[in-house]
Amino acid sequence: MENEVFKVTGGSRLSGQVHVPGAKNSALKLMTASLLAAGTTQLENVPDIADVEIMAELLTRLGAQVNRDISNSTLEIKVPENIGHRADYDLVRRMRASINVLGPILARCHEVDVALPGGDEIGSRGVDMHIAGLTKMGAEFNSDHGYLIARAPKGLHGARIWLDIPSVGATENILTAAVLAKGETVIENAAREPEIVDLCLMLNKMGAQISGIGTNTISIIGVTKLTATTHEVVGDRIVAGTWAVAAAITQGEVTVTGVNPTHLQIPLEKLMSAGAQIEIANDSFTVRMTQRPNPVEIVTLPYPGFPTDLQPQFIVLNSIANGAAMVTENLFEARFRFTQELARLGADLQIDGHHCLVKGRLQLSAAPVEATDVRAGAALVLAGLIADGVTVVSGVSHIDRGYANFVSNLTSLGATIERTRESI
Ligand code: EPU
């Protein structure tokens, strides 16, 4: 059997400039939100990643026509007056963000059948808060042969909803249902990630009435109809943060453009504690590092806390730091699974529940490793950049889900990396 792999040769110092595209975790949600209005939605700054393809396939099955122009990063979605109401298992299992069609389809059709996503490589990933919120708005839920079936024969109405934790997905599904519900919905303890702000901004352009955007209390007054619009996807803070760590661990100097640095406030502060110099501009920042990193304590939390999606990359940074640091993961219970692969490169890691004690080593040692999810995959490539020898990372399809032009971006910064096929 042949398998696609990345071969990374360690030892290069990264330097230069890299541009980040729109955020995966915004683009996918904006695509589902297009279902809320018949007509043509135009999305700009859409990343060239595998997950966008999967979402385009899902929208197509629901009756939309999706045209992608990779040369100028745009996506045109033509949504008909009547859309389908079923999201099939073969797509949902490939991409968990498919669950985000729940809110928009329920709002438009008053009925929806979505395959239950199940758990994945990073955790169990329940949908109980999505269901509880939409139930308060008048939907009735059942599960049948692996599908979540929701019906709201009388339509949805506004409600006051308190989330147990500020779940990104639950906030989004409730938001996208509430914009067309009757009356006012208030989401308390809502998530406030920049990608949620982006979604709210697009929905308001479509005619929605959302206030409290970017705070933990979002209020939505339902309207009867929305109009398709044009929207530019917010820059990807996680891709930007990944390049920032790559610059720091290779003692390089990299300017990252296309992202709002305030979306990365805590990660950039952590890099400064690690010894990096950071220069901030409006929509770019530069990371310069001239020393072995100092260890940095990390605790992942919902935004504006430290993002779980940068936790694996910072474990890599700590793995070559001049001391020990504790990394605490509060969002996904299985997100430390990748550390077993990182240990193959010689990293000194001790896991105790949701804590990982990382003791810095002078250097990592190249070995074959397997990417288990998108961020773990990116982190293992970063580890390869600071290992002696050639690290072969398999499971690269995980990385392709979230990083556009990953190899060419790294190559342009001076890394030695190639995509190739290997027999396994
Ligand atoms: N949770 C529940 N019940 C729910 C909803 C969430 O128990 O009803 C739990 C989850 O199992 C998880 C925690 O709450 O343990 C946080 O989940 P959340 O709903 O906030 O996350 P998500 O919407 O499933 C999105 C991103 C993730 C990112 C998280 C946190 C997308 C497509 N995914 O997931 O991105 O880590 O928010 O910021 O937007 C990635 O890009 O690599 C990625 C995993």
Image (cartoon, helix red, strand yellow):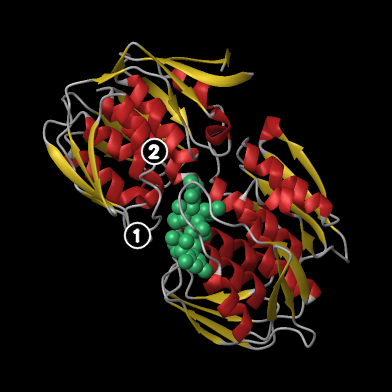
- Image position of 355 (left or right of 76): left
Q: Residue at x 49, y 58 (%)?
A: 124
Instruction: Give the number of the disc on residue 304.
Output: 1
Q: Residues within 10 Å of mark 2 (few under 14, many from 20)?
A: many
Q: Nearer the viewer, residue 19 or 346?
A: 346
Please determine whether, in this image, residue 375 is positioned above or below residue 157: above
Q: Residue at the location (27% across, 29% down)?
A: 248
Residue type pointed to by label 2: Phe
The structure residue drawn at horizontal position 53% and vertical position 46%, both measured from the top left corner, is: 23
Query: Which residue is nearer to you in this view: 82 or 336?
Result: 336
Q: Quick check: is the Cβ at mark 1 less than 8 Å away from ligand 1? A: no
Q: For residue 424, what is the image quadrant?
A: top right
Q: How many marks?
A: 2
Residue under pointer 2 = 338
Asked whether mark 2 and ligand 1 are closer than 8 Å, the reply comes as no
Residue in the picture at 51% in, 22% down: 407
Indicate the position of residue 7 as horizontal and vertical percent values: 47, 15
